[in-house]
Structures are given as C-alpha cells and as structure tokens.
Amino acid sequence: MKNMELNNDNFNQLPSTENSGGQENKSRIFWWLGLFLAVIIILTTVVWIVEREQGKKVVDDRNLPVVNQETEKNGEEKKMETLVRYGKMSLKGTPQTVKPGEKIIVNILIDTKTPEHPEIANIVLAAARLVYSADKLTLEKIDSKNSVLPMSIVQNKSTGKVEIVRGVAGNANPEDTDNGYTGTGGLVVSLEFMAKESGSAIIEFLPEESSLLLDDGLGTKMILDYENYEIKIK
C-alpha cells in the first residue's frame, strides 16, 4: 500500500502536459494578435499621412491660375515666329543747290510701312548713323524739337559723321497704334549744314548701323530701304 501511495503522490507531482500546451497556444495567439494590430496601426497611419499630403496638393493646385493649354501653346508659337515688317529711312533737304556759305536743312525721316508692304508696324526706337562730305559741309546744328520720337538716347556729332538714336514708349505690341510710332514721313531730327566750297556733297546712311526697332518686346529690326541725299554747291 505504501508503494501505491508513493506512486500516486509522485504521479500527482508531475507537471500537467495539457495545461502547459494550452498556455503556449494562448501565448502564440496573443503574439499574432499583437503583430496584426501593429500592422493595422502602421497601415492606417501611412494611409492618413498620404491622404493629408494629397489634400494639401489639391488645395495648392486650386490656388494656381488656370491656364488654357491651347492659348499657352499658341502664345509660345507666336513668340517663336519672327515678325517681318518693311519700312524706310530717308533724307530730305532744302535747298538742294546752294552757294558756299549758305545753309541747308536736311531732315531724317522714317516710314514704318511701304506701298508694297502696307502692314501695320509700330516702332519704339530709331537709330540713324550717317556720314557726310566733311570737306564740303559743316554740321552746325541738330534740331529735335519736332521729332515724332520724344526720347533722346544718343546724339553725337563729329567731323564727317553724325549719330542719332531716339525712342518712344511702347507696350510690346507691334500691331497697335495707340503708343510707339506708326506712320510715314515721321521726323527724327533736322540737321543744319553750312556749305563750305564748290562741289558735290553726299550725306548717306550707314545701313548696318541704322535701324528701326519694332514694339514687340524683342528688339526686332525692320527690313529697311535707305534714301540718301546729295547737295550741289556752286
């Protein structure tokens, strides 16, 4: 009997296999539940952050001006096209025949269109660089009081050469007429010469240095004809 009792006691003291297995399963279940919840929390946080940033972008985009893509494209194409306009710079004077010691007035005139090319052309600047027969003429005066271009930029004279650059305000639109200058026979300046000795005196433009700039905001030069002037001194 004692042996049986001992065996029963020993049996009662052994760990329960059923209880330990249940505890281990519970631990695993809790671990997986915890991991699952952590993943859910992380995903929820990421989604919230992404949605918030997208919301900010939408608000910012709403504040941007709406641009018509077709209009923008047409504007870019227009800028790429070089505007071509034709005009003329000429010299007109009186009298054309003089004696030594007499004075001659020669006007620098501009045309922003021609009979062959009557398209509207608005300009903001005229540059006239001329040479003249210094042995026959003396340049005594440059008069700009009646100029169609009110702003004097350059006005230089030296023996045998004169340089005039004048301008007027524009608005970067070469096809309007409410500013800048558009027209024919526009006076830039008047030059007053005195005849020195008998002979033929020439006053002429330097074409590579004489130009009319369109009111297009790009400084586009017009294609010009030039008319020079000859004085007979007898």
Image: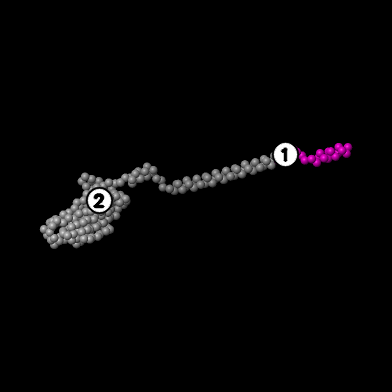
- Checking the image for residue 58, the label placed there is none
Identify which amino acid the numbered label 1 is placed on.
Gly
Residue that carries the numbered disc 1 in the rendered image: 21
- For image coordinates 88% across by 39% down, the residue present is 2
When the figure is inspected, residue 203 is found, relative to residue 119, above or below; the finding is below
Say whether residue 10 is magenta: yes
Residue 151: % across, % down? 27, 58
When the figure is inspected, residue 24 is found, relative to residue 133, above or below; the finding is above
The residue tagged with tag 2: helix, strand or loop?
loop
How many angstroms separate mark 1 from mark 2 (CA)?
A: 103 Å
Residue that carries the numbered disc 2 in the rendered image: 182
Residue 168: % across, % down? 28, 55
Q: Quadrant of residue 36?
A: top right
- For image coordinates 88% across by 37% down, the residue present is 1
Q: Is residue 187 left or right of residue 26?
A: left
Are the two marked residues, 1 and 2, in contact with CB atoms closer than 8 angstroms? no
Say whether residue 21 is magenta: yes
- Mark in front: 1 vs 2: 1
Kindly report the secondary structure that dominates the magenta region of the rendered protein.
helix
Range shown magenta:
1-24
The residue tagged with tag 1: helix, strand or loop?
helix
Q: Quadrant of residue 139?
A: bottom left
Instruction: Return the disc, 1 or 2, that comes first in the chain's sequence.
Output: 1
Q: Quadrant of residue 167?
A: bottom left
Identify which amino acid the numbered label 2 is placed on.
Thr
